[in-house]
Image: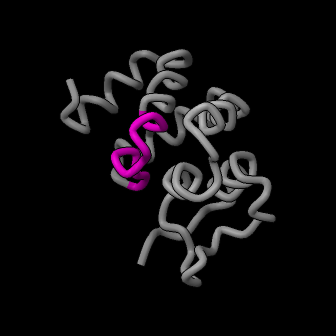
């Protein structure tokens, strides 16, 4: 069983996937355990679409997602490769230090 989304998680999820209709339940009937992975695999039509969705978020929201990933509560390794690159690129634009911390946590430095 995945983590339960907080109000902030739902707010971010809804910004990234408004077409979900404020519903974070998968087609299998389970709540999504992560925010970014279903956006990458279910909602974004391309890497460019994924990036455009991320760019609608505030700096604080992108950093929050990075913090969740650092804590092991958000999955960035499970994203499509170009989506992971897009997340890193958007994060780098806001906080190169946070990107370095995340990559270090993931063993990517």
The number of callouts visible is: 0
- The answer to whether residue 79 is magenta is yes
Front residue of this view, candidates 66 and 24: 24
- Residue at 39 percent of width and 24 percent of height: 99
Specify the principal SS of the magenta part.
Answer: loop
In reply to whether residue 30 is colored magenta, the answer given is no
Left or right relative to 34: residue 102: left
Which stretch appears magenta? Answer: 73-84
Q: Which color scheme did the rendering employ for the protein?
A: one colour
Q: Position of residue 22 (x, y in %)?
A: 77, 64
Q: Along the horizontal axis of the image, is 67 left or right of 15?
A: left
Q: Provide residue 31's location: percent of width, then percent of height.
A: 56, 75
Where, by quadrant of the figure, is residue 29 drawn?
bottom right
Residue drawn at (43%, 47%) of the image = 79
- The residue shown at (43%, 45%) is 80
| On-image quarter of the C terminus | top left
Location of the N terminus (image quadrant): bottom left
Identify whether 82 is placed above or below 4: above
**Picture quarter containing residue 69?**
top left
Indicate whether 49 appears above or below 92.
below
Give the farthest residue toward the front.
46
In this view, the residue in front, 49 or 54, is 49
Q: Quadrant of residue 6?
A: bottom right
Where residue 54 appears, x then y in whole percent?
A: 63, 35
| Relative image position of residue 41 (x, y in whole percent) | 52, 55
């Amino acid at each position: 069983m995945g983590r339960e989304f907080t109000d902030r998680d739902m707010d971010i999820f809804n910004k990234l996937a408004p077409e979900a209709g404020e519903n974070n339940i998968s087609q299998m009937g389970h709540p999504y355990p992560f925010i970014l992975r279903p956006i990458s695999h279910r909602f974004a039509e391309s890497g460019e679409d994924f990036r455009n969705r991320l760019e609608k978020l505030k700096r604080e929201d992108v950093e929050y997602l990075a913090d969740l990933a650092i804590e092991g509560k958000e999955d960035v390794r499970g994203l499509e490769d170009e989506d992971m690159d897009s997340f890193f690129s958007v994060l780098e634009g806001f906080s190169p230090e946070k990107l370095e911390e995340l990559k270090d946590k993931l063993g990517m430095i």
